Image: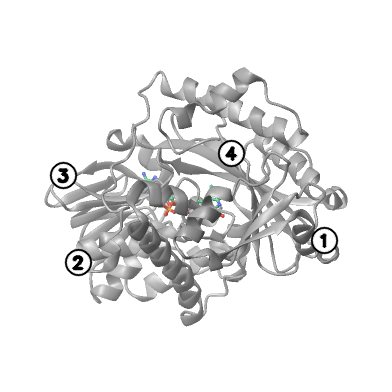
Amino acid sequence: MNGYDIPPDAGRSWWLREALAAEPGEPSPPLRGDITADVVILGAGYTGMWAAFHLTELQPGIDVVILEQDIAGGGASGRNGGFVNSFWGDLEYLARRFGDRPAIELCELGEDSVRAIGAFCDEHGIDAWYRADGEYVVAASEDQFGRWADGVMAADRLGVSEHFQVLAGEQMRDRIDSPVFRGALYRKLGATVHPARLARGMRRVLLERGVRLFEDTAVTRFGAGDPVVAETSGGSVRAGTAVVALNAWASHWKRFRRTLMVRGSYIVLTAPAPELLKEIGWTDGSGLADMRAAIHYVRTTPDGRIAFGVGGIQPNLARRIGPRFAYDAHAIRIGVEDLHRMFPGTLDVPLEAAWGGPIDVAGHHLPTFGTLGGGNVHYGHGYTGNGVGPAHLGGKIIAHRISGRSDPVLDLPLVDLEPLKFPPEPVRSPGALVANTAIRRKDESEDAGTEANPVIDFVAKLPRRLGYNLGP
Ligand SMILES: Cc1cc2nc3c(=O)[nH]c(=O)nc-3n(C[C@H](O)[C@H](O)[C@H](O)COP(=O)(O)OP(=O)(O)OC[C@H]3O[C@@H](n4cnc5c(N)ncnc54)[C@H](O)[C@@H]3O)c2cc1C
């Protein structure tokens, strides 16, 4: 990859290209004609595919149709960092918001999902590089040091502190060496995965189970009612029940416009550099994220690459998700500079790919799984860039709701969680861009060890002052 011009793959993730080369699979042609089904699912990412998977577990023989505008895994599910998490990182907020017991239950059932994803890969012969080696939340500047304190105290109070370990600067650098690391919180739970191999493996399993998948099939109109009708340019699906699993694209729907905000997240990937990884001591499958408000998330691959992600970027003021979410030269440049700052040894390592994707930001930084109107349209979104593990849980919630089977997952506080509303347009996008820029500037000041200008500091903290669980 030379320079920052849009690459020939137009921002298709390296993960997806690698997964398609490893297992191309039979193509699923677009929908042609009018068909019926028991359940129609909009979107073939993890949410839609886990919902389909759990439905086929609960009701073998159920007739499920999935409509996908791209290919399965073409959205965030085939583009992400591959951190498979539960909700332990939000424990303090969850306990404050929902109470101690519901918070612990959510973290534990979320953790079951993390394990279930590994077991699913084993059971179905999916080589998705799943490794449950935990993750580091590092302080990558003096300011970030100790930001984990509230979470650690909450864990201690709730009797789950065995999941967390605080590491001093040197202890952290002994594990993974970077000149900017000042200390870390190690969370023993959590895994990493090859996101697109997982998505494409799920696709294969669903096809084997008789789920009908139509790719290159964008839903252009959706009619709630009984039956629901999903229309596309080539035909339509009538079904008793629908699942809206559109991630950030759901923000294009009037119903979700006020409760979802779209941000970009971008990843740069180095060429294999196993010697460098050995030198810095990073030879397991652990993930690493820092404590910026707009986080960096970093992981490795078995052939010795570093995938370096930058979260929380708003590429422009556009209200629709366009090509800049798949590739944005400015975001990629930030990613490369920050990679070199964190791991200076990568200055000599060529970059091989860069891409991005949209994330569905919810005001409380938590996904919600709900049901609309007449009770036969279910949805799940709001992962705020943390959906790899939680989408498994969400698919299970949605499938149990549809099949009417009881399960502890239906008692979780994410079910029918009332979303926080963002301000309406035309205030929202420019306001969010200003706050977003201030958040990044504040992060950059902290990286440089300088005080952020008081105005920047004030604006960066506005979202939280306004009651959102977002920003510093
Ligand atoms: C760069 C990046 C890094 C990330 N890193 C992590 C991470 O490390 N860990 C983590 O937990 N989370 C991460 N995330 C978030 C995670 O990828 C998502 O939360 C998760 O994939 C959501 O799954 P989904 O099925 O809801 O969404 P998606 O996978 O986006 O699926 C939605 C699908 O709907 C399709 N669609 C949209 N409109 C239509 C339409 N009109 N008709 C038909 N189909 C349509 C899209 O093409 C897409 O395939 C990251 C996201 C990005 C972009």
The answer to which of marks 4 and 3 sits earlier in the sequence is 4
Residue 235 placed where, x, y %?
27, 50
User: Mark 4 Cα within 10 Å, few/some/many (few <14, many 20+)?
Assistant: some
291 or 359: nearer the viewer: 291
Q: Is residue 214 visible?
A: no
Q: Which mark is residue 22?
A: none
Which residue is denoted by mark 4 in the rendering?
A: 293
Regarding mark 3 in the picture, which secondary structure is present there? loop
Q: Is residue 244 visible?
A: yes
Q: From mark 2 to mark 4, how far is it between C-alphas?
A: 39 Å
Q: Amino acid at mark 4?
A: Ala
The answer to which of marks 3 and 1 sits earlier in the sequence is 1
376 or 74: nearer the viewer: 376
Which residue shows up at 68% across the image and 43% down it? 7
Which residue is denoted by mark 1 in the rendering?
A: 280
Q: Amino acid at mark 1?
A: Ile
The answer to which of marks 2 and 1 sits earlier in the sequence is 1
Regarding mark 4 in the picture, which secondary structure is present there? loop
Q: Which mark is residue 403?
A: 2
Mark 4 within 8 Å of ligand 1, using the beta carbon: no
Which residue shows up at 42% across the image and 23% down it? 428
Residue contact between numbered discs 3 and 1, judged by CB atoms under 8 Å: no
